[in-house]
Amino acid sequence: MSDEINPSLDQLAAQRCMRLRRDASPWLNEEIAQRMHARLSWMAQPPKRWAHWMPHWGGLRSHDSLKDMLAQANGRAKVHTYLAGPEPVDATSPGVGSSWLRSAWQALRRVDARWQHGDEPLDMVWANMALHMQAQPLPLLMQWLSMLRVDGMVMFSALGPDTLRELREVYAHMGWDQPTHLFTDMHDWGDMLVQCGFADPVMDMETLTITYATLDTLLRDLRECGRNLNVQRAQHCFGRGWEQTLRAALEQHLPRNSDGHFVLSVEIIYGHALRAQPKVLVQAQTSVPLADMQRMLRKPKT
């Protein structure tokens, strides 16, 4: 499998999108994070040490509720939490005015340490809505693997191939370039997890049907929750009449429900997997890292 699993995605544009100055984390990401919380009940032992990958993108509000839920599950006053990933532009740029996102991020940094390589391995990496923003996701999966202890778990979500299919059909009908990059199928995510060294991947998906009474709210949501990151998107600025043309096309071709509201579908993929016990390949001469050998010797026999 090629490392460049998603050649349709402009990686630089995706990085800029995730680090945009915002008043809050995208509402869709916050909603999906809440749905991920219910899946934590599948864990035999709730994590005591965990990292939230890019919490300003994955959902700062859900970060607080996740901390409270895991603290209660562990019977502890506070779960030791780590933040991971690059900080948003809003939290690091000098001279930037105050905002909810900046103040929320700074509040988290006062109480949550930033995970760094060399720290004690984690029980869980929590990564909401990050993988579909990677043109080369294998290095990121390997990074998450390196953060975990043996039998530690990664839990993630991503957009699936049916996301915004109604919008893509309108663009295709009009002969326009596609409004999104391609999204990876959940079976491919499962294959990549195994390829990177994870074990027992469990994947599932659901489709959210979002309805809009007006095009104003629909277009506002599209701007808030993402951007067109397709490498083949138009590279020039559109003229003054572009928005009117777009609105007319959506008005005519976008499907509606029985109430006359516009309809968009969002496919959400959920996945979790464990860091596998290191395996020793039997050869004429075998080299094993000392740390891996110590972990294998300490593991109870079953």
Image (spheres, rainbow, N blue to C red):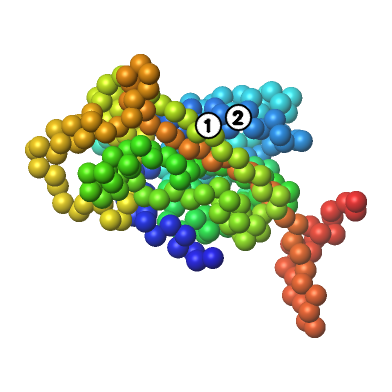
- Which label belongs to residue 49? none
Q: Residue at x 34, y 55 (%)?
A: 10
Question: Regarding mark 1 in the picture, which secondary structure is present there?
Answer: helix
Q: Residue furthest left?
A: 240
Residue 284 in which image quadrant: bottom right
Residue 9 quadrant: bottom left
Q: Viewer-proximal residue, 149 or 195?
A: 195
- Label 2 sits on a secondary structure element that is helix
Q: Nearer the viewer, residue 81 or 209?
A: 209
Which of the image's four quarters has the N terminus?
bottom right
Q: Position of residue 6 (x, y in %)?
A: 43, 57
Residue at the image position 77 percent from the left and 68 percent from the top: 280
- Residue 77 as seen in the image, left or right of residue 182: right
Q: How far across and down, in percent of the image, does residue 134 sit?
A: 44, 52
Res. 227 visible in picture: no
Q: How many marks?
A: 2
Q: Is the C-beta separation of discs 1 and 2 under 8 Å?
A: yes
Does residue 34 appear anywhere in the picture?
yes
Q: Return the residue found at the far bottom.
A: 284
Dot 1, crowdedness within 10 Å: few (<14), some or many (≥20)? many
Q: In the rendered image of this protein, does residue 48 appear above or below residue 138?
A: above
Three-letter amino acid code at disc 1? Ala
Amino acid on which the number 2 mark rests in the picture: His
Q: CA distance from mark 1 to mark 2?
A: 6 Å
Q: Nearer the viewer, residue 194 or 139?
A: 194
Q: Residue at x 74, y 24 (%)?
A: 75
Q: Which mark is residue 37?
A: 2
- Residue drawn at x 45%, y 63% as measured from the top left: 4
Residue 164 rendering spot, x and y as whole percentages:
38, 38
- Residue, disc 1: 33
